[in-house]
Amino acid sequence: MNKFLSHLLAVLLFLGFMVFVVMNQATPVRFERLEGYGGLFLEGFINTVIFSFIALIGSMVTGFLLFLISKSKYQLLRAFDTIFTEIIYGTPLLVMIMIMAFVIGPAFNVFNRPVMGITGLIVYITPYMKNIFRSSFSSITEEQFMAMDLFGFTSYQKYRYIIIPQVVRILMPPLMNNFSLIIKGSALLNVLSVRELFYAQSIFHSRTFATVVGLITMWMLYIIITIPLSQFIRYFERRWSL
């Protein structure tokens, strides 16, 4: 059996399982209940993508800064990196979002819960971003720097032709994996009534009580975002033979 037929069979098995689950609910599943709520789910879908992209960019910036701090010659800064990383690793994402919105934000007179929720997501992802910067830049060996100096490369030439292409090549797959993690983690912003995809499902459920329809719709919309992203990662890895 070739690869295409194997994947097709797997998809059909999954769809068959989903049909079985839907057909065996205690109450009939009526997808016509979605009528009039397309805009609600579309808004949640778009906001999920926007908020996740903002968190991705923000965590890239903070992750790179934390990477620079971890390389500092000052012991205090390196100690800050260690303590901060351990605190984040020991904190569930939901707790971080709540702490940001209800504890840290008000301490600075910031009561905008969506902003603080996204900030919590950024803070949580920061150490993971630091790790991918560390692994990417560690691929540039001392021998490569010696070779660049030997051939008289300028700083621009070093970064343009050697460092940046090599770092980006290694950086992209884990970066996209972190983006997928952010997208899935953004569902927890629902606890702050941020109008993302999970919140749209909650509103739909509260008005129609169509639990199964809302959950399946939300699930499919998340998959529409994450599966193309995972396929892009695989394409990139094949393209660059990672």
Image (tube, helix red, strand yellow):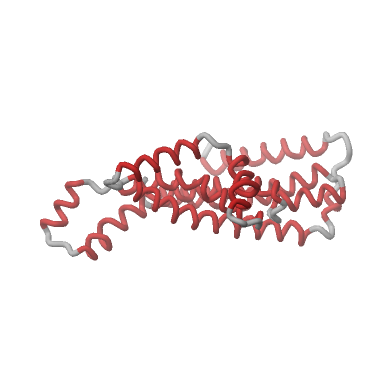
Residue 151 x/y as whole percent: 12, 59
The answer, for residue 77, to whether it is visible in the render is yes
Residue 23 x/y as whole percent: 82, 37
* Residue 150, quarter of picture: bottom left
The answer, for residue 184, to whether it is visible in the render is no
From the viewer's perspective, is 83 left or right of 50? left
- Of 198 and 17, nearer the camera is 198
From the viewer's perspective, is 192 left or right of 230? right
From the viewer's perspective, is 228 left or right of 35? left
Q: Residue at x 41, y 48 (%)?
A: 237
Residue 88 x/y as whole percent: 50, 39
Residue 92 x/y as whole percent: 58, 37
From the viewer's perspective, is 85 left or right of 34? left
* Residue 5, quarter of picture: top right
- Of 72 and 107, nearer the camera is 107
Vertical side of 105 occupied by 28: above or below: above
Q: Looking at the rendering, in which quadrant would you find the C terminus?
A: top left
Q: Residue at x 71, y 60 (%)?
A: 43
Q: Residue at x 76, y 39 (%)?
A: 19
Q: Residue at x 31, y 58 (%)?
A: 164
- Of 153 and 80, nearer the camera is 80
Give the residue at the far left of this rendering. 150
Vertical side of 162 occupied by 185: above or below: above
